[in-house]
Amino acid sequence: MKIQSPRMVEIPLAEAHDLALSEGEPVFVPCGYHTDDRGWSIMNRFQGVLSPAGQINYSVMYPGVIKAWHRHQIQTDFWLVLHGHLKAGVYRASDEVAWSVVMGEKRPGTLIIPPTLWHGAATIGDQGAGLLYYVTHAYNPASPDEERCGYDEINGFPWDVQFR
């Protein structure tokens, strides 16, 4: 399996979402910090994509954790790592194409994952990672838009650190 980086684009999130949907591939939109003498912030990350049907969530993953794999049939995910670092994995089963990107404090940005792509994440380093994410359709426990498989069921995806 060849692992590639998601397409990186510096366009508004709504346009990047359209691109991810039309190409059926993940898209990474880098962002910068607003910094002054009081601290720093990342602002307006979900502007233009929020809808009443969506949901904003926050999840913390402990060091050494791999949360994978799952996919949705109608939902798009927008991931932004606020502290620590994650290695995000995305996989398209139809042609066995995979993408990997490390994102977090030292590489801020939003990863857009369109429907039907398997995806998951692993913490990188010795600290936990905090993931703020927006989903275009709120979770429905009576009929979840979710299919799952084990982290090791997509053969050849390198969740571990790749020594180069």
Image: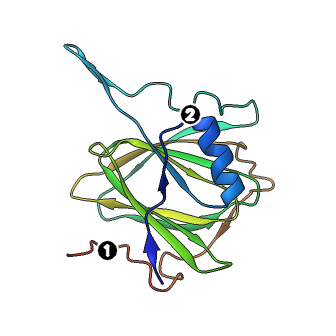
Real-space CA distance between mark 2 and mark 1, rounded to the nearest whole angstrom: 32 Å
Q: Quadrant of residue 106?
A: top left
Examine the rendering and report whether any part of residue 129 can be seen.
yes
With respect to residue 35, does 59 lie above or below? below
Residue sitting at x 68%, y 45%: 18
Counting from the top left corner in percent of width and height, residue 107 is at 32, 46
- The local secondary structure at tag 2 comes to loop
Q: Residue 71, percent across and down?
A: 65, 64
Q: Nearer the viewer, mark 2 or mark 1?
A: 2
Give the residue at x 56% y 33%: 12
User: In the visual, does 49 lie left or right of 78?
Assistant: right
Q: Nearer the viewer, residue 43 or 83?
A: 43
Image location of residue 149, percent across then percent down: 60, 75
Lower sequence index among marks 2 and 1: 2
Q: Quadrant of residue 55?
A: top right
Three-letter code, disc 2:
Pro
Coloring applied to the structure: rainbow
Q: How many discs mark residues in the rendered view? A: 2
What residue does disc 1 label?
A: 160
Element type at mark 1: loop
Residue at 53%, 37% (x, y): give it.
Answer: 11
Q: Is residue 157 above or below residue 28?
A: below
Are the residues flagged by discs 2 and 1 in contact, CB closer than 8 Å?
Answer: no
Residue closer to the observer: 96 or 59: 96
Residue annotated with mark 2: 12
Circle 2 crowding by C-alpha within 10 Å: few under 14, some 14–19, many from 20: some
**Kind of residue at disc 1:** Asp
